[in-house]
Image: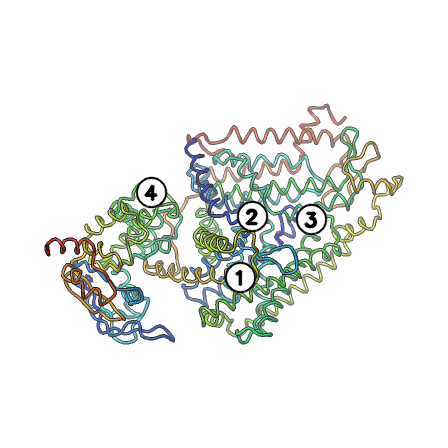
């Protein structure tokens, strides 16, 4: 069976003593899709991401990974299938060296040591960070930290990659490298971001969130080219698209 | 070698800017903290001494401290051979002794604050050096200083020639509860992150309040409370990151070190040396040899 | 008030290591049983928080000085006593290893002095019964300040006890007590106010945060009994030990006799009181009689009494040995190439 599917069915959620943050949210993302999740601050993006590997449980509705509903019994398998790259790599890197950090997940899976070593090597190779493997993570640059954080998730061999603001605090070169890297992945990808240019380059599909709902769902170029729609939800059309648009208008 | 020391200087520079909050930060402690980045570098080296089973080093260090502290209170010369142990460790592990001794100098003033009373409380003259008599109090104070240098330098050297990770691992295999071992590792990891956050808060305050102004208790509560909130939020996210990589409360090691015969030799050799140095005053005998018998 | 290795005898250090080690093992079991693994990163980050918080100083009202947080009470309020004790132990261990605060032999003492009293005495017996509502108010501040003061006073008293029992410092027990306790009374009050301020702030910002872990950390049944038992054991041990110390010629009595000016060495009967006075202010004095033997000390009987001659040779030899030790360390230093280990 395939784990590459991820689906939300009428998900409602509220924090204790708070108003609803997710209000009847549904979507279905299939194998190999790269989906951009956009929306203003407070739209509920981060809350949604925390549902995707079971840190939060919906008040009603359900999340399905593959063909399995996400429950307390299936949460361990779901976390293996869904790899989350956090917004701040400092939260994700806590071991003394890069190699040990990447090995942390595979070791927890109970894999034999030689397979752990092989996975560490492969994951670091994939993100081009083999040269820093023995260095402590806090000494890396922001871009290197981000790449290593991705490697820690890749070493778990997830089917679905979820990323929260992957380009935040990166300089333009670091950002460029990250885009190339993400483009090359064959995983199902969900990228929550304010960086709409990133979405233009990587994603085939876009979900717009506003006030706890999915308010738009469609091909990236269509949605990101729709100035009125974006404006209505507090977003701005990416410069690359508006530039092209202006040219055709003239 | 040159590259390495340059890196260290640059590194300290970074730390210094991160720590420079003028009057707000506790400076004497701040300087002590600065060494932590450098200490981490040294602990991460890969000399044979670094790779040696940490349990052996921990055990030897404790035996060393036991021997040093077992001397009578006026002893001075017989303690000297014991400096061999930390100095050899530093040499083998490529740790500059000046670094360790600088840290010893700024370390805990408590021993000095308490020991300094000895010369006043024990004024009876005890030995004669040349034509000058020295009181028991000064002797015991000097002895305290020497013990202090020995025990403190050996503790710092233990860390610098092992590294926190290997040390924690060794502690775990010596029967220290897993909860405490994991606690030490995480504390250490987040030391860097939270101290930097504390630094940012301190700087922000200094910018608004000016460097000369003092922190009232009310401001202090809010400041430290903010730091606490940030720490708690971070703890939450770290937990999520760990859990999403399959963490369930147990940690496994990548390279469990093996106990080799040379490690046991290290232990036995040093303990023999401590024993000999404890029961024969090596330094005194050497001096007697030099200036002619018991005079 | 970190104890230092240099002031400790191995016996006192060993006993305190055993006590703290036992407490740690016990707390680890409790934490494992009572709390989920969510607690573990929480404890780690809060340990780091205590470090960072100690870097920020506040001014103490009415004085020219400033102080910083000790942290034991805050940890107990946030994490419950068991986890708090483990966090304090880890903080002190890192301080001993990185900053040379205290030392390894004294670590057992420091964990006990700075961890046991806030977590297992001040918190359950003073803070918790008084602090029912966390809305501020008289009871809240009484609880915070009272707990901080009592925790610190007991800790400081233990420092005095441990130092005196070790017999390396000449400070007499009573003098030392009168030095330590009033200072730590002032520090305790400020620590209590700071703790209260931080707790109130956090409660305002994150209501409901403090309630949970504390409740889940409350020992099921028997916990209070254990604490009271431990407390009683401490008092009894403390009482017996200090009685023993005060009758034994070594520790206390010996130091006190010295301070009172009663010279324990008959061989020096000829020496004037003036000599003692001058010696008290200066270190070195020209040409007077010298002590022939050490005062009775545990191990000194097997030790040759230092005479002037051996002392000079000891001094020369000592310096020479130091030079040799430095030389050996320098010669044996790793020069980048890997050599086999030498002992």
Residue furthest toward the front? A250
**Category of crowding for the residue at label 3, using alpha-carbon neighbours closer than 10 angstroms: few (below 14), some (14–19), many (at least 20):** some
- Looking at the image, residue A245 lies above or below residue A19: above
Q: Are marks 2 and 3 in contact (CB under 8 Å)?
A: no
Disc 1 versus disc 2: nearer the observer: 1
Tell me the subunit letter for badge 2.
B
Q: Quadrant of residue B5?
A: top left
Disc 3 versus disc 1: nearer the observer: 1
State the separation of the CA atoms marked 4 and 3: 47 Å
Q: Earlier in the sequence, mark 2 or mark 3?
A: 2
Q: Secondary structure at mark 4?
A: helix
Q: Residue at x 48, y 67 (%)?
A: C202
What residue does disc 1 label?
A: B219
Q: How is the image coloured?
A: rainbow
What residue does disc 3 label?
A: B114
Q: Are marks 1 and 2 on the same chain?
A: yes
What residue does disc 2 label?
A: B27
Tell me the subunit letter for badge 1.
B
Q: Secondary structure at mark 2?
A: helix
* Image quarter hosting the C terminus of chain B: top right
Residue C91 horizontal side relative to residue A81, left or right: right
Q: Are marks 4 and 3 on the same chain?
A: no
Q: Earlier in the sequence, mark 3 or mark 1?
A: 3
Disc 4 versus disc 1: nearer the observer: 1
Disc 4 versus disc 2: nearer the observer: 2
Residue sitting nearer the eye, C68 or C232 = C68
What residue does disc 4 label?
A: A132
* Image quarter hosting the N terminus of chain B: top left
Q: Secondary structure at mark 3?
A: helix
Disc 2 versus disc 3: nearer the observer: 2
């Amino acid at each position: 069976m395939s784990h590459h599917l991820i689906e939300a069915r009428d998900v409602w959620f509220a924090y204790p003593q708070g108003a609803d943050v997710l209000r009847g949210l549904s979507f279905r993302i299939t194998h190999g899709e790269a989906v951009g999740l956009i929306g203003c601050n407070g739209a509920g993006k981060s809350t949604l991401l925390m549902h995707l590997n079971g840190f939060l449980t919906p008040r009603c509705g359900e999340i399905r990974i593959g063909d399995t509903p996400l429950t307390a019994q299936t949460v361990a398998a779901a976390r293996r299938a869904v790899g989350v790259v956090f917004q701040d790599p400092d939260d994700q890197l806590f071991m003394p060296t890069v190699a040990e950090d990447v090995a942390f997940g595979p070791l927890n899976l109970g894999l034999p040591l030689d397979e752990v070593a092989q996975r560490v090597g492969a994951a670091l190779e994939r993100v081009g960070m083999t040269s820093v493997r023995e260095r402590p993570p806090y000494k890396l640059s922001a871009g290197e930290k981000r790449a290593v954080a991705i490697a820690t998730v890749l070493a778990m061999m997830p089917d679905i990659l979820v990323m929260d603001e992957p380009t935040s605090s990166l300089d333009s070169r670091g950002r460029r490298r990250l885009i190339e890297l993400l483009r090359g992945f064959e995983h199902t990808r969900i990228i929550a971001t304010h960086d709409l240019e990133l979405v233009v380059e990587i994603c085939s599909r876009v979900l717009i969130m506003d006030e706890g709902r999915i308010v738009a769902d469609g091909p990236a170029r269509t949605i990101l080219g729709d100035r009125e729609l974006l404006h209505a939800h507090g977003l701005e059309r990416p410069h690359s698209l508006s530039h092209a648009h202006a040219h055709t208008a003239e | 070698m040159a590259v390495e020391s340059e890196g260290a200087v640059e590194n300290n520079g970074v730390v210094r800017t991160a720590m420079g909050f003028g009057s707000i930060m506790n400076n004497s402690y701040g300087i002590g903290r600065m060494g932590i980045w450098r200490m981490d570098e040294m602990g991460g080296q890969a000399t044979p001494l670094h790779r040696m089973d940490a349990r052996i080093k921990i055990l030897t260090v404790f035996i060393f401290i036991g021997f040093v502290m077992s001397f009578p209170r006026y002893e001075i010369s017989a303690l000297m051979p014991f400096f061999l142990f930390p100095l050899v460790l530093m040499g083998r592990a490529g740790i500059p002794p000046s670094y360790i001794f600088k840290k010893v100098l700024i370390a805990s003033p408590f021993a000095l604050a308490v020991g300094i009373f000895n010369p006043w409380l024990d004024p009876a003259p005890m030995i004669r050096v040349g034509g000058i008599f020295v009181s028991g109090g000064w002797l015991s104070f000097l002895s305290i200083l020497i013990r202090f240098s020995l025990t403190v330098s050996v503790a710092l050297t233990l860390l610098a020639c092992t590294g926190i990770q290997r040390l924690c691992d060794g502690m775990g295999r010596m029967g220290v509860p897993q909860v405490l071992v994991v606690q030490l590792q995480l504390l250490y990891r987040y030391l860097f992150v939270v101290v930097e956050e504390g630094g940012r808060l301190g700087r922000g305050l200094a910018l608004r309040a000016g460097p000369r102004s003092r922190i009232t208790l009310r401001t202090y509560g809010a400041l430290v409370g903010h730091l606490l909130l940030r720490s708690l939020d971070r703890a939450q996210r770290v937990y999520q990151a760990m859990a999403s990589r399959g963490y369930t409360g147990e940690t496994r090691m990548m390279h469990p070190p093996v106990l080799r015969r040379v490690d046991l030799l290290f232990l036995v050799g040093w303990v023999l040396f401590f024993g000999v140095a404890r029961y024969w005053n090596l330094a005194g005998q050497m001096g007697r040899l030099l200036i002619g018998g018991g005079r | 008030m970190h104890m230092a290795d240099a002031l400790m005898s191995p016996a006192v250090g060993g006993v305190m290591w055993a006590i703290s080690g036992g407490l740690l093992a016990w707390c680890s079991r409790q934490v494992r049983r009572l709390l989920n693994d969510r607690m573990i990163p929480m404890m780690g980050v809060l340990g780091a928080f205590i470090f960072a918080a100690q870097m920020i100083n506040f001014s103490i009202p009415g004085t020219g000085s400033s102080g910083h947080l000790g942290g034991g009470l805050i940890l107990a309020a946030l994490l419950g006593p068991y986890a708090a004790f483990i966090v304090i132990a880890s903080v002190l261990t890192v301080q001993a290893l990185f900053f040379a605060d205290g030392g390894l032999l004294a670590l057992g003492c420091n964990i006990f002095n700075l961890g046991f009293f806030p977590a297992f005495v001040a918190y359950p017996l003073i803070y918790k019964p008084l602090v029912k509502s966390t809305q501020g108010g008289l009871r809240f501040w009484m609880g915070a300040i009272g707990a901080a003061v009592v925790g610190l006073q007991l800790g400081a008293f233990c420092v005095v006890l441990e130092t005196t029992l070790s017999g390396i410092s000449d400070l007499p027990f009573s003098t030392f007590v009168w030095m330590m306790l009033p200072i730590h009374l002032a520090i305790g009050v400020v620590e209590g106010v700071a703790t209260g301020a931080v707790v109130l702030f956090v409660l305002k910002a994150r209501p409901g945060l403090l309630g949970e872990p504390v409740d889940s950390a409350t020992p099921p049944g028997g916990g209070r009994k254990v604490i009271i038992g431990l407390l009683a054991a401490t008092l009894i041990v403390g009482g017996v030990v200090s009685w023993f110390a005060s009758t034994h010629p070594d520790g206390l009595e010996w130091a006190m006799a010295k301070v009172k000016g009663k010279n324990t060495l008959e061989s020096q009967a000829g020496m004037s009181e003036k000599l003692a006075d001058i010696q008290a202010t200066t270190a070195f004095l020209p040409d007077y009689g010298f002590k022939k033997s050490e005062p009775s000390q545990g191990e000194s009987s097997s030790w040759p009494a230092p005479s002037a001659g051996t002392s000079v040779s000891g001094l020369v030899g000592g310096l020479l040995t130091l030079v040799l030790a430095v030389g050996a360390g320098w010669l044996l230093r790793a020069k980048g190439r890997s050599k086999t280990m030498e002992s």
